[in-house]
Image: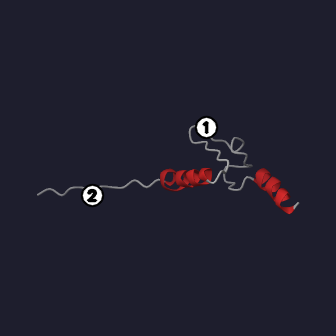
Amino acid sequence: MTATQPQCIKLDQRGHMEKPLLDHLSGLDREVIDLTEKKQTPDAAHREGSTVVVILPVARERLKGINA
């Protein structure tokens, strides 16, 4: 009798977290900048560094509009 290997499910962050979120935001008429197919650099994503989550120039602009 030979044992078979259990089928593994591949869970990747892009497919299970990032892409569904981007699709949802797009459905809410939000501008989505998806750099998956391009070489990603912080400048291309309007970020100050590769570990920055918040796009500060955009956040500042939006906050000025809210607070005006």
Q: Is residue 22 left or right of residue 65?
A: left
Residue 30 marker: none
Q: Is residue 60 left or right of residue 43?
A: right
Q: Residue 33, percent across and down?
A: 65, 45
User: Which is more toward the observer, 25 or 59?
Assistant: 25
Q: Residues within 10 Å of mark 2 (few under 14, many from 20)?
A: few
> By what rule are the colours in the image chosen?
secondary structure
Is residue 57 positioned above or below 37 on the image? Answer: below
Quarter of the image that includes the N terminus: bottom left
Q: Amino acid at mark 1?
A: Lys
Q: Residue 46, percent across and down?
A: 73, 45
Q: Residue 32, percent across and down?
A: 64, 47
Q: Amino acid at mark 2?
A: Pro
Residue 6 marker: 2
Furthest residue toward bottom:
67
- Identify the element where label 1 is drawn: loop
Residue 37's quadrant in the figure?
A: top right
Furthest residue toward left:
1
Picture mark count: 2
- Identify the element where label 2 is drawn: loop
**Precedes in sequence: disc 1 or disc 2:** 2
Rendered residue at 72%/48% (across/down): 47
| Contact, mark 1 vs mark 2 (Cβ under 8 Å) | no
Furthest residue toward right:
68
How far is mark 1 from mark 2, CA to CA?
A: 36 Å
Rendered residue at 72%/42% (across/down): 43
Q: Which residue is identified by label 1?
A: 39
Q: Residue 18, percent across and down?
A: 55, 53
Quarter of the image that includes the C terminus: bottom right
Rendered residue at 36%/55% (across/down): 9
Furthest residue toward top:
38
